[in-house]
Image: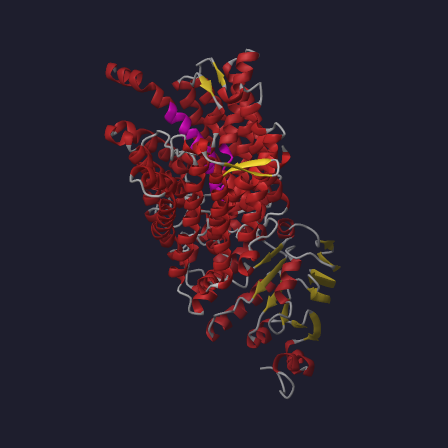
Amino acid sequence: MIAQQLLNGLFLGAVYALFAVGYTLVFGVLDILNLAHAAIFTAAAFAAFSLAVGTGMPLPLAFLIAAAMAGIIGILLDRVAFAPLRRRNAGTLVPLISSIGVAIIIGATLRGIYGVDERHFTTGAADTAPVLHLGPAAFTIVELTIFLAAVVLMFVLSWTLRASPLGRRIRAVAEDRVAAALLGVNLERTIAATFFIASSLGGAAGVLTGLEYNSVTLDMGGPIELKGLAIIILGGMGSVTGAVIGGFVIGAVETLATAAGLSEWRDAITFGVMFLILVARPTGFFGKRALRQA
Amino acid sequence: MNALLDFYAKHSQLIDQIGINAILALSLSVSLQAGQLALAQVAFMGIAAYVSTILALNAHWPLAATIVAGVVASTIVAALLAFPVRRLRGVFLAIATIGFGEIVRVFANNLAITGGAEGISGIPNDAGTGVIYASLALVVLALFALSRTRFALAVALVREDEHAARGVGVDVGTVRLLSLALGGAIAGLGGALHAHSSNFITPADFGFATMEQVLVWCVIGGVTSPLGAVLGAALLSILPEVIRVLADYREITNGVILLAVILFVPGGIASLWRRGAVRVRV
Amino acid sequence: MLQLEQVGVSYGGVHALHDVSLRVDTARVLGLIGPNGAGKTTLVNATTGLAPLATGSIALDGARIDGLPTHRIARAGIARTYQNIRLFGVLDVRANLAAGAFARPGRLTEDAARELLERAGIAHVDLAAQASTLPYGDQRRLEIARALAAKPSVVMLDEPAAGMNPSETTRLVETIRAIAASGIAVLLIEHDMALVRAACDSVVVLNFGEVIARGTPAEVARDPVVVEAYLGSGAETLA
């Protein structure tokens, strides 16, 4: 039983981590808490739905296109809501509020296009998907694929940040924007790339979540938006490694809490832990410095 | 005169709602004036709503007493919250207070006394328009009176430059505590009134979505004067009703207005007729 | 009178200040000079409660103030200006002065406000002007006026002449001497040796967190230890 719960926690945590990584990347580079991240998560899920179910596109392709679309929305988000504020040195709280504005607009647009009904990727096919076993724990191919997709994406991100020229530029901007600019880094392009990466990962998490529960709804971003905060606080704001670990930890905490019969109190436990960390050690376990060392 | 009464009869629900929304917006504006993005107002609102409701239904207290009890409860909780968050600033304070709000919501969702996820229904609908607007007027007057005191200067200094504020003798910790407590009291008032003007309350009334809405009102209206918060709440509550076509686009209008204000009128709409330096009269 | 006795401040393992003793007397101006990084601002920060003391004590008119929170030290009668101006930029001039007088009972009347501007040498400035819109030199002097508004017994000026031209600096000398003459103990951190010579009764020289010389400005300028600290060996004297 515990093995099953741990496995569930692992799968859940992978998607949480994927979502959180985008959140923390933007914070690490720009000191902004992007509250439109969850809206992009949701939008990508709907996009994938439209592509896969609406036009009959194969799922993997729909997934990639939806994630890319999410990335583009991220770039637009920056252009519209953050870049103008950067130019006038508006601080870090104003962009937060501005991101809420964009989140509202994205949500309202989705509601306008799709209405309030729940959408599904398949109609029951998932129930007949082959079930595999790892010891006493069982999982479906779908769950495994989702898990692997999430893990692969996180590895790609990690490699990008650590080893690629773009990654070096992103880390330079995160460390010291002014110095990076003086050293010839094109700030606006690097920031746009950061948003593309962060949002496409967030969008990917949305599609995967939609597939996991076979459900795409307007409010699917709600729970994960706030949970994402807990995850990045736990892992340290700005630390990608921390977000990954935090995602898995929270995933584990949630499934274990459910197993212990405390499922209604799950969120209180998650946010309680977050609150304690903020009070005791606001920089979390890895903190912002970690992004510079990736 | 008849036309007015007619108007009121048709729109009394909305009118009451605007009054309560304005009170909630004012509660957040107090924190924002001190430069603190403390987003736990909904939690304070909820605590007062539940306390007030439970006392009314279970102990049969009269309206005024339940409201006072609710406000006292929310104020105490707000003051207590000030201690663990005293070193937190900016985004971290925002997140901590959001987290606190979520914890309160989970408790409301799970305790028997709060009726769990279904909440409590059958609340006496005895907070009429008069009570609501009298309360609003009270809060506005109190805040105006406060704006002429040394406390208001201290709040402005803490907002502008905490470091320099200490250097001129401002006890920053106490200012933050008082502004959080004051915000908690006002939010509590709004919550108790909300409970007594709706038939039922559920934990969903006091979630992050509501908090975001209150934040939107404050930002759009502007927070440097109490009137700004009231304006924001009133405007955004009325707009979709007055322009019928906008009702369907209420959400997106909110978002667009919010962005427009942030980008072009950062002081909020209320700042449009204030020019030059921020005057702090002491 | 401000008395620092064997004050030591550490950041991590680094001694930012070590065994520093000095005294600023009422109605006197004490100059605090030293190369960049010598610990001058650390000393001011320690005095105002922003850095904890590892060793030693700080007393104001005989009463210990080390360990007190910054706002209490301010209320006890120590006012300061900042190396990088820290006015309340968005507020008007009058509000900035009222801020300075925050710890004082009563309101700051318009007359009192104008008098402060006069003492700081900016009598011409409009009380209703937004502080951040003032020219740089006026902003520096507004910070001084704000410090005076507290009716302090000690004023610490952290590089008030930074960015000023020679004629402005000369005017600043008069302002500083007048502040001291009004019964205030003044600690002046400065790089401009001409200003230090003209304004200070005595000087303390810091290097690497330690006091390396004391005396009148003239004595200190000739002190070979000081000259070497600033200019390296081979130079004869400080400007």
Image location (x, y in percent) of residue B241 = 28, 27
Residue B28 inside the magenta-drawn segment: yes
Give the image quarter of residue C78. bottom right
Residue A125 relative to residue C231: left or right: left
Give the residue displayed 62% in from the left and 87% down from the top: C235
Q: Is residue C191 left or right of residue B6?
A: right
Q: Position of residue C197 (x, y in %)?
A: 59, 76
Would residue A275 be counted in the magenta stretch? no
Q: Magenta span covers which residues?
A: B17-41
Relative to A92, residue C221 above or below = below
- Residue A243 x/y as whole percent: 54, 48
**Residue C63 visible in image:** yes
Q: Closer to the camera, B278 or A52? A: A52
Quarter occupied by residue B26: top left
Dominant secondary structure of the residues highlighted in magenta in the image: helix
Eyeballing the image, is A277 above or below C155? above
- The residue lying toward the viewer, choosing from B241 and A142, is A142
> In the orientation shown, which residue stands out farthest toward the top?
B60
Q: Is C17 drawn above or below residue B46 in the view shown? A: below
Q: Quadrant of the C terminus of chain A?
A: bottom right
Coloration of the structure image: secondary structure
Using residue C32 as the reference point, say whether residue A223 is left or right of it: left
Note whether residue B94 is visible: no
In x, y percent, where is residue C214?
A: 70, 74
Q: Nearer the viewer, residue A43 or B272?
A: A43
Screen quadrant of the N terminus of chain A: top right
